[in-house]
């Protein structure tokens, strides 16, 4: 069973760079200049921002399910980047280099399973969680900060060798 890690859509954040600091503040968004790497993982490009780049720190509802598992948290988004277009079955370095919490959800948005593992092992963890019939999708989170990283969907039409 293959899988697809999905970034957030760039279009959802494109207007942030046009806003003044007062408007960003009203929306609880902070504009920051990256001073080190890694440390600012972008949920759109699925890459760590590089020193000197501008990122936006904002609260994002990543699980809008009408369940007790509805959730939002702080995320970083790099200014002016396109959404990542990862091949099926690929885990980006941004995830492979961190400790990751994998949270499996059913079709109703209820959590049905969870794991914590080194990012290098995430592909195997994803396959294991998708091996449980109730799992419809998986959310990846950075385990230390608890921040949402990306969504993972099944890719049933490809097989991996």
Image (cartoon, rainbow, N blue to C red):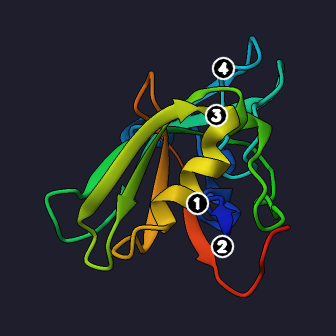
Query: Which image quarter is the C terminus in?
Result: bottom right
Depth check, mark 4 against mark 2: the one in front is: 2
Q: Identify the image quadrant of residue 59.
A: top left
Location of residue 90 in the rendering, given as x and y in whole percent from the top left corner: 78, 55
Mark 1–mark 2 CB contact (< 8 Å) = yes
Q: Can residue 30 be seen from the camera position used here? A: no
- The disc, 4 or 2, on the residue closer to the chain's N-terminal end is 2
- The disc, 3 or 4, on the residue closer to the chain's N-terminal end is 4
Q: Name the residue tied to disc 2.
A: 1
Tell which of 128 and 151 is nearer to you.
Answer: 128
- Kindly report the distance in space between the C-alpha atoms of the residues bearing marks 1 and 2: 7 Å
Mark 2–mark 3 CB contact (< 8 Å) = no
Q: Name the residue tied to disc 3.
A: 119
- Kindly report the distance in space between the C-alpha atoms of the residues bearing marks 3 and 4: 15 Å
Q: In screen coordinates, is 110 left or right of 121?
A: left
- The disc, 1 or 2, on the residue closer to the chain's N-terminal end is 2
Label at residue 43: none
Q: Name the residue tied to disc 4.
A: 39
Label 4 secondary element = loop
Q: Name the residue tied to disc 1.
A: 127
């Amino acid at each position: 069973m293959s899988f697809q890690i999905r970034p957030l859509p760039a279009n959802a954040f494109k207007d942030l760079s046009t806003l003044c600091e007062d408007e960003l503040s009203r929306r609880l968004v902070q504009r920051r200049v990256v001073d080190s790497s890694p440390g600012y993982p972008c949920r759109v490009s699925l890459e760590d921002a590089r020193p000197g780049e501008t990122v936006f720190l904002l609260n994002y509802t990543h699980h809008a399910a009408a369940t007790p598992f509805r959730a939002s948290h702080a995320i970083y988004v790099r200014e002016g980047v396109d959404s990542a277009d990862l091949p099926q079955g690929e885990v980006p370095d941004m995830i492979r280099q961190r400790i990751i919490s994998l949270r499996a959800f059913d079709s109703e948005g209820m959590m049905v399973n969870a794991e914590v593992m080194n990012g290098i092992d995430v592909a195997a963890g994803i396959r294991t969680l998708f091996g449980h019939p109730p799992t419809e999708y998986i959310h990846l989170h950075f385990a230390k900060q608890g921040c949402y990283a990306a969504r993972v969907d099944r890719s049933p039409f490809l097989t991996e060798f």
